[in-house]
Amino acid sequence: MRIVVALGGNALLHRGERPEAAVQLANIDRVATALAALAHEHEVVVTHGNGPQIGLLAAESVADPALSAPYPLYLLGAQTQGMIGSLLACTLHNALPSVRIATLVTHTLVRAGDPAFARPTKFVGQVYPREVARSLARRRGWHVAQDTTGWRRVVPSPAPERILESETVHVLLDGGALVICAGGGGVPVIADRVTGALTAMDAVVDKDFTAALLAEDLKADFLLILTDVPCVYEDFGAPAQRPLLDATPAQLRRMSFPDGSMGPKVEAVARFVERTGGLAAIGSLDAAHEIVHGRSGTLIRPDL
């Protein structure tokens, strides 16, 4: 079975942890263990979030006195693809010595006229108290918004139209490689209508939407979104919350989920299942193998 796995941005940095290299190195073994269990039995493509990492790099870039202007988000996104891709590749090589591992810096085509460029909604970086976030917004020209646990920077998040390297991923898979790609949703680019020339855009594409599009392009059998909760919950955080163990896209669309957390994940799996007739699931990283085998998480299946 061909599985596209989307790791949450907190796979390497859990909520509340300091964004240090040593912390991420300590967490990577847990990620590799979960992925190796799948790769022993299936063809695996790995995508990953980069919210904490790109937020850290952006803050460092803004504060660096040696720079006349901070680095644009698209370059920081490319840096995080390389950094996280390298961590994953080395650790997976140690866990799967007989499997070829390929890390690919990936670009995602978006529309120049996407209204998201005028309406920043994508959370990046660490969580701040409200007054600290507002102060940073004034000093650094950021947009900030309230997340589930505090206040964070928000940036434009245009919809992915096409993953430019999807054919290259096909070739690598056909050669037996486990592929790490589309990190952070890929570097967002627009193409000139006449020449096709690419221009990178200062934005962050939602990695779950990119993962769903990639899974569709690759004709994957299963889209697996791994996060820090065991499953999707209806009325999450309320006294009457209940776990959803099985759902169809139509059932999910009748419910409400937060835009900044579970909402994009639910929409991504619903789109994939609707467009391909395949299966998808959302659940905890540590239960990845059990989720694929129907013993954990929330399974999303086609409408009857």
Image (cartoon, grey):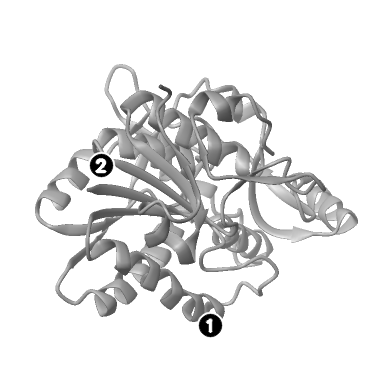
* Foreground of the two, 14 or 142: 14
Q: Where is residue 127 in the image (x, y as percent from the top left)?
A: 74, 59
Please tell me the numbered disc located at residue 165: 2
Q: In the image, is residue 3 above or below residue 53?
A: above
Q: Position of residue 49 (x, y in %)?
A: 49, 54
The residue that disc 1 covers is: 22
Q: Position of residue 60 (x, y in %)?
A: 63, 65
Q: In the image, is residue 145 above or below residue 15?
A: above
Amino acid type, label 2: Glu
Packing grade of label 1 (10 A; few <14, some 14-19, many >=20) is few
User: Residue drawn 56% across and 38% down?
Assistant: 264
How far apart are the alpha carbons under marks 2 and 1? 31 Å
Amino acid type, label 1: Ala
Q: Is residue 137 left or right of residue 119?
A: right
Q: Specify the farthest residue to the left.
A: 175
Mark 2: which secondary structure? loop
Q: Where is residue 130 in the image (x, y as percent from the top left)?
A: 87, 53
